Image: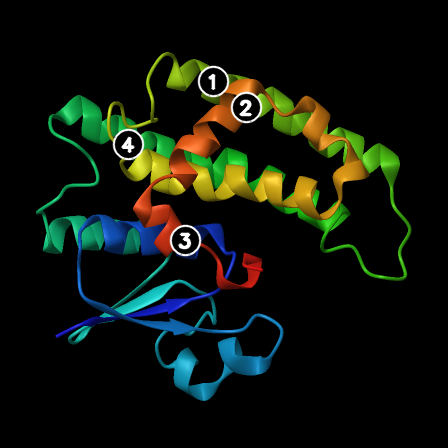
Amino acid sequence: MAITFYYGSGSPFAWKVWCVLEHKQLPYEWKRLQFNVAELKSEAFLAVNPRGKVPAIVDEDVVVYESNAIVEYLEERYPERSILGSGNANRARNRRMAAEADHYLYPLQRELFVQTLFRPADKGRDRAAIDKAIEAIVHELAHWERSLGSAQYFGGDEPSLADWAAFPVMRAFVRVEEREPDNGLGDKTPAWMRAYIARMEALPIIQKTWPPHWKG
């Protein structure tokens, strides 16, 4: 029986889970929920996740929400094609970097979006706040550059959970640059990150899971 996967386009947490489903080559039914309507707060979805947030999955009679809980469940339930690699050190590294993506990278992405793409139409641009957000991103990315080192992926020679967690957030930084190129982030985006994003975008998994509303 296929897993039911509840998703929101552009959510880095949902994108992470989607990549894991594809990485593990699991059968799933994809259900996209809109953020700008009441679908997340509908009675039907609240019965799945009473917090009204994506992602969430239903696997037979098991319901799981919160992205890290989902990927851990999938890894334990379907250990084939591991997202954590072999050995305790690799598995710990992937778990740590996934947590870092959630707790350090994502808050910076959200703040940048609040100051740019999510800014109310009647609110003027706060140049100081945008510059501060970009400065914090550049500072955090230096840590990720050290973690990547000379490897192709954060997981090593092959992409793994660390990449499925970090890439969606990093790609969202580029999304801001694409939508509002005069914000200044592009000038400060490090070359290593652009090269990493290009490698990730070339992967079939990323091409298949590209946020639908980013297309076209």
Give percent across and percent down for residue 148.
Answer: 39, 19
Mark 2 — residue?
141
Residue at image x 42%, y 74%?
50
Cβ atoms at labels 1 and 3 below 8 Å apart: no
At numbered mark 3, what does the secondary structure look like: helix, strand or loop? helix
Kindly state the secondary structure of the residue where label 4 is placed.
helix
Q: Which-is-in-front pick, marks 4 and 3?
A: 3
Q: Foreground: 215 or 172?
A: 215
Q: Quadrant of the N terminus?
A: bottom left
Marks 1 and 4, how far apart at CA: 15 Å
Viewer-nearest of labels 1 and 4? 1
* Alpha-carbon span between mark 1 and mark 3: 22 Å
Left or right of 101? Residue 93 is: left
The Cα atoms of the two marked residues, 1 and 2, are separated by 6 Å
- Residue at the spot 53% in from the left edge and 35% down from the top edge: 105
Mark 2: few, some, or many residues within 10 Å (few <14, many ≥20)?
some
Q: Which residue is mark 4?
A: 94
Judged left or right of residue 24, residue 40 is right
Residue 91 coordinates in the image, percent (x, y): 20, 31
- For label 1, the residue is 145
Extreme-bottom residue of the structure: 43
* Label 3 crowd bin: few (<14), some (14–19), many (20+), radius 10 Å: many
| Residue in view at x 25 percent, y 53 percent | 22
- The mark nearer the N terminus, 3 or 2, is 3
Mark 2 belongs to which amino acid? Leu
The amino acid type of the residue labelled 1 equals: Glu
Q: Is residue 123 above or below residue 197?
A: below
Q: Which residue is mark 3?
A: 15
The reply to whether residue 67 is visible in this rendering is no
Numbered mark located on residue 129 in the image: none
